[in-house]
Image: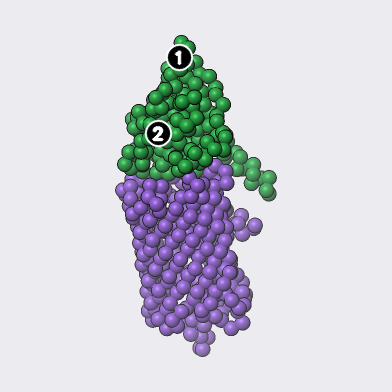
Chain colours: A purple, B green
């Protein structure tokens, strides 16, 4: 509860604006109409790596524009804050780190709608995302990365639109280079050469409008990442609910996603059945959007 | 906590306003001189099933109100008021149907969605005039789609078709 209040305060303090998501991570296939603007703010709190203390907040301020009735473009500014102590993992988490908020990257998104969910049997959009980060979202230390994601968003209206099914498939390619760190123990592994990673993501979920403007949703996310040296670096399954309010001029969504299973790289002494090096056990997501 | 959540939900829901009253819609459809006599909406299960089969959408009699439009002792037609699901809220609309089962006109009473305000324009609604239960109502083919409001347009199209079928099965040949 306290964490949720903190996330709300972060959003309000940033005077952020918001685009309409019914879920935490899962995206719909509907485009913005031509000439429409949406501005939105997302804050994600990730916490608990099983050992020590780990809390990170990632924010994204996004500006979305309907270029045509099919093509939506958006630009996002990413930021993050981190507090971690008592956990050191070779090659991933070099040690304690704490800062309030730093700018961490930028992203460009393009979504092209091929099939409209209310007109065709199923909605389908093709999405491309280019993301440049200069901070590592896991350790919080400096790391330059460039990612290109391509994928499809699917959407189906059921019961005249009272129930919505959505699915996403995405493939992300990343080239990342860590910067040198001083003061690390001699035996600590901290490679600074370029790494290439491939991440596959599949998501699905349902959202039900239980009274006008209010939706309850459930979603699941399966993700795998393959990396140059270790092959399968991580695999995780997250599941969780969302509550969404959508009004004429603004919307907000609160989501929780918990890791139910994971595998891949592990650290000594970590709890079994999770991937906790790059992922956490819990994610809380707050989104707020304004339609301009 | 639960009470606060339900209260905030109710406040947000009650903030919506209607654009047109049913009385204004009736006058727009059949004029000032007609009297509008409230008629009970037929709701027997066989009818609901038959409408669903022909229209492809569920008939919810509790959301529908019907009036007979009568001028100088002669019935001009019926006024139907119904609600369909929009992206966030219900869309309330009225349909005038003449004694031949043709749409006189369609009027939107409330539309509170972010995009797609064009749905309330008389020029867009004029596409329904003269339609009968037998004619196709496919969005993008027979009725022009509105970008950003495709679910609203689809559900209004299906709703008008459903009311015409209800009219034909239950009232037209009474």
Q: Nearer the viewer, residue A269 or B143?
A: B143
Is residue A176 in view? no
Q: Nearer the viewer, residue A43 or A128?
A: A128
Name the residue beneath numbered marker 2: B133
B51 on left or right of A69: right
Is residue B173 in view? yes
Q: Residues within 10 Å of mark 1 (few under 14, many from 20)?
A: few
Name the residue beneath numbered marker 1: B74
Q: Are marks 2 and 1 in contact (CB under 8 Å)?
A: no
Q: Secondary structure at mark 1?
A: strand
Query: Residue B159: x and y, percent?
Result: 45, 37
Query: Which residue is at a point 49% across and 21% down the rendered structure image?
Result: B68
Query: Which residue is at a point 35% across and 28% down the rendered structure image?
Result: B130
Chain identity of mark 2 = B
Question: Looking at the image, is A292 positioned above or below residue A218?
Answer: above
Query: Residue B105: x and y, percent?
Result: 39, 27
Q: Nearer the viewer, residue B67 or A11?
A: B67
Q: Residues within 10 Å of mark 2 (few under 14, many from 20)?
A: many
Q: Earlier in the sequence, mark 2 or mark 1?
A: 1
B2 on left or right of A185: right
Question: Looking at the image, is A126 positioned above or below residue A230?
Answer: above
Q: Nearer the viewer, residue B106 or A184?
A: B106
- Marks 2 and 1 share the same chain: yes
Count of marks placed on residues: 2
Query: Which residue is at a point 57% across and 43% down the rendered structure image?
Result: A211
């Amino acid at each position: 509860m306290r964490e949720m209040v903190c996330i709300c305060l972060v959003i309000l303090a940033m005077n952020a604006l918001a685009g309409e998501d019914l879920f935490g991570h899962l995206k719909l296939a509907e485009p913005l109409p031509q000439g429409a603007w949406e501005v939105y703010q997302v804050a994600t709190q990730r916490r608990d790596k099983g050992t020590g203390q780990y809390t990170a907040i990632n924010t994204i301020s996004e500006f979305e524009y309907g270029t045509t009735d099919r093509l939506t473009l958006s630009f996002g500014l990413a930021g993050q804050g981190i507090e971690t102590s008592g956990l050191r993992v070779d090659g991933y988490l070099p040690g304690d780190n704490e800062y309030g908020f730093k700018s961490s990257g930028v992203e460009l998104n393009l979504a092209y709608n091929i099939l409209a969910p209310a007109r065709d049997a199923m909605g389908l959009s093709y999405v491309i995302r280019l993301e440049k980060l200069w901070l590592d979202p896991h350790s919080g230390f400096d790391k330059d990365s460039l990612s290109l994601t391509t994928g499809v968003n699917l959407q189906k209206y059921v019961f005249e639109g009272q129930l919505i099914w959505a699915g996403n498939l995405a493939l992300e390619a990343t080239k990342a280079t860590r910067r040198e760190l001083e003061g690390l123990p001699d035996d600590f592994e901290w490679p600074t050469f370029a790494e290439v990673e491939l991440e596959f993501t599949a998501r699905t979920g349902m959202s039900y409008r239980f009274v006008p403007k209010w939706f309850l949703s459930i979603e699941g996310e399966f993700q795998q990442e393959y990396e140059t040296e270790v092959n399968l670096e991580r695999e995780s399954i997250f599941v969780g609910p969302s509550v969404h309010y959508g009004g004429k001029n603004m919307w907000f969504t609160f989501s929780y996603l918990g890791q139910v299973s994971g595998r891949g790289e592990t650290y000594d002494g970590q709890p079994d059945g999770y991937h906790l090096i790059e992922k956490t056990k819990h994610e809380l997501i707050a989104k707020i959007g304004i339609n301009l | 906590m639960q009470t606060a959540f339900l209260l905030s939900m109710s406040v947000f829901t009650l903030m919506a306003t209607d654009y047109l009253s049913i009385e204004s819609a009736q006058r727009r459809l059949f004029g000032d001189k007609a009297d509008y006599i409230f008629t009970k909406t037929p709701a027997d299960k066989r009818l609901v099933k038959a409408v669903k089969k022909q229209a492809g959408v569920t008939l919810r009699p509790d959301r529908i109100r019907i009036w007979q439009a009568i001028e100088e002792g002669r019935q001009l037609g019926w006024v139907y008021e119904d609600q369909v699901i929009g992206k966030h809220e219900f869309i309330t609309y009225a349909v005038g149907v003449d004694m031949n089962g043709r749409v006189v006109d369609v009027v939107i009473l409330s539309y509170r969605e972010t995009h797609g305000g064009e749905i309330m324009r008389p020029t867009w609604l004029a596409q329904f005039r003269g339609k009968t239960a037998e004619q196709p109502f496919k969005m993008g083919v027979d009725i022009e789609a509105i970008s950003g409001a495709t679910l609203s347009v689809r559900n209004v199209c299906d709703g008008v078709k459903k009311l015409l079928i209800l009219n034909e099965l239950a009232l037209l040949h009474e």
